[in-house]
Image (spheres, helix red, strand yellow):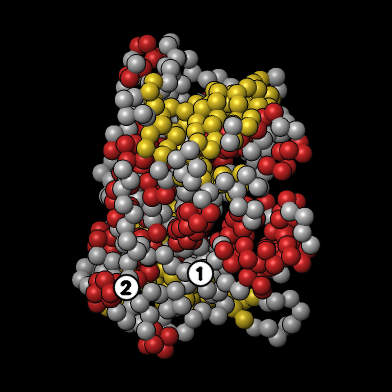
Amino acid sequence: MTELLRVEGLSTHYLSEGQTVRAVDNVSLTIRRGEAVALVGESGSGKSTTAFSIMRLISNPGRIVGGRVLLDDRDVLTLDAAAMTRLRGVEMSMVFQEPMTFLNPLIRVGEQIAEAIRIHQKIRWSDARRKAIETLDMVQLPNPETVADYYPHQLSGGMRQRALIAIAISCRPSLLIADEPTTALDVTIQAQIMHLLRQLCSELGTALLLITHNLGLVAEYCERVYVMYAGQIVEEASIFDLFESPRHPYTEALLDCALLFDRRADRFRTIRGRPPSRVEVPSGCRFHPRCSRVMAECTTVEPAVVRLANGNQVRCLLHE
Amino acid sequence: MKPLLEVDDLQVFFPVSDGWSTRDKRTVKAVDGISLALGEGEVLALVGESGCGKTTLGRAVAGLTRPTGGEIRFRGQALDRLTAEDRPVYRRQVQMVFQDPYDSMNPLKTAFQMISQPLLINRVVPRDELETEVLRLFDKVGLSPGPSYLNRSRHQLSGGERQRLSIARSISVSPSIIVADEPVSALDISIQGQILALMRELQDASRISYLFISHDLAVVRSLADRVMIVYLGRVAEEGPTEAVFNAPKHPYTLALLAAHPIPDPERSRKRRRLVLTGDVPSPIDPPSGCRFHTRCPIAEPICSQAPPPFLAFGDGHRAACHFADRIESRMEALSTVAPTARPG
């Protein structure tokens, strides 16, 4: 598989009340064509900011302060606004967590999809509408002609997410970023949406970057994983390696938490403390205050990313 | 032993209207004939998709929603026959913990005010011992060092701390039942365990019973003694947790289990696929016969004609499905999607 997206040393900061929050700090990742990759982390780990930075949707007080985002060898961060508009939707697009926030409540669903198509293709409204209906059919909404005339409030949560996916794939992008696409949905509807995403991506040859906190979804739908903690990537692995032998103590602890829920728990495994505030990042390894295998040097030495023999990466002094 | 709480054939209906017509007399049957019993120190989980009535049932038990029919008995005494003196006593005995502690807290009040108010109203401690008692409760729910939390308001607390505070508020009046409505679903996974551990600890220490409402099967399995799976206001299946998880008898339970993502790539890619189509139907006009038949993969003509009876499987495990006793062979017969092969 050839490389589609390469993010190198991406840093995004938020400036608030004179303080700098380093939401994304020197993040590098790659996605190959057609691959399904997960970016996992707890809330506040910087995973959504990474996604928004790749799409260049960061607005004040946030700013991308460094790094490169190469999509097919072009640096997305240096493109002008017009080129960026041509790129978004056509080459990469995004599905968000809460579809109601991203659908216009006053415009019929079909028209919103047609609008996305007309931004990128010089076609008539009637043709765009026909394409919109085709797209609604692709996301498996029943009676697409009828649904096209519905307003967002007439759709259920699962149907809204399908409509949002329809907008995202209407121009057949080569990269689809899905930011917690099923967090607001029931498990049964979550399964429907994830199956649909997987099916569409394989039909269209689209690569998927799934942003999630749910390790179950990662295990089921992705091939490779990046784990994020406090703005940094702490581990990268193929999913079978990650779930079989996690290398970073944070990953290990997260898996413990997730797996222990799988049966009657005699005691609950937790990670002590809580994610650090990003204004005051811990010295040394950022995970050290919560780590069960903390050593003396973890408090002072910041671990570098180490590439392991099997091609996986980890950021931990235990592996240096 | 007599159960602490008994719910008999409970119905909670809400009138709805489309707008103009006053003759429009339709109702949402949120809870339509549910019975349950909750023993002392027991954890009963209510599970189902959104819109199936689990929150309404919890609110009715907590006395926040008036039932349309049926009866709720607490220590043998019917709720609707409580005297004016007994009603506050019941309210004290049954407390509620909500899903989003942010929404259920007054933004203008400090943690101290939030906990001291129920203590004062219920005259739990005299005024001069208030602070000691609040600090004792903080300590009990793991908010330490306690004094540093006294003057914080809700926006100065993390999600986990807020849920701890909300638990402190509910145990301040020493209840015997806590109705916990999705208490951990808004929290990060590393924090969920902390809150569940706290709930288990309180239960062991004070014999509190929980009516635990959740859509997350993993959380339910880790905590509950018994589970009740509800669908469109009715019970689909109930029984001891391990019996229901290991040998589910209702296709809806099977579908919920199959939809739950397993954090293990080997297992999750090998198991049987069962994806329900569509959404939960409207509770205004629920499907005839078995309410699940419109989405059921093994439905037959009888399912739309006759409501299924409960079939019992011992130890209180029962399921309302015409084919509950033959569920394994029925599911086997379904075509299965080939498991995804391991790459490489």
- Is residue B261 positioned above or below A246 on the image? below
| Image point (33%, 19%), residue name | A319
Residue A42 in view in this figure: no
Q: Which residue is mark 1?
A: B278
Label placed on residue B334:
2
| Image point (41%, 54%), residue name | B216
- Looking at the rendered structure, the kind of residue marked 2 is Leu
Q: Earlier in the sequence, mark 2 or mark 1?
A: 1
Q: Return the x and y of residue B218 as percentages of the image width and height.
A: 35, 51
Left or right: residue B232 compared with residue B235:
right
Determine the chain carrying the residue at label 2: B
| Image point (22%, 72%), residue name | B313
Q: Return the x and y of residue A6 as percentages of the image width and height.
A: 54, 31
Left or right: residue B16 compared with residue B323:
right
Residues behind callouts 2 and 1 on a single chain: yes
Where the N terminus of chain B falls, by quadrant?
A: bottom left
Q: Return the x and y of residue B17 as percentages of the image width and height.
A: 68, 77
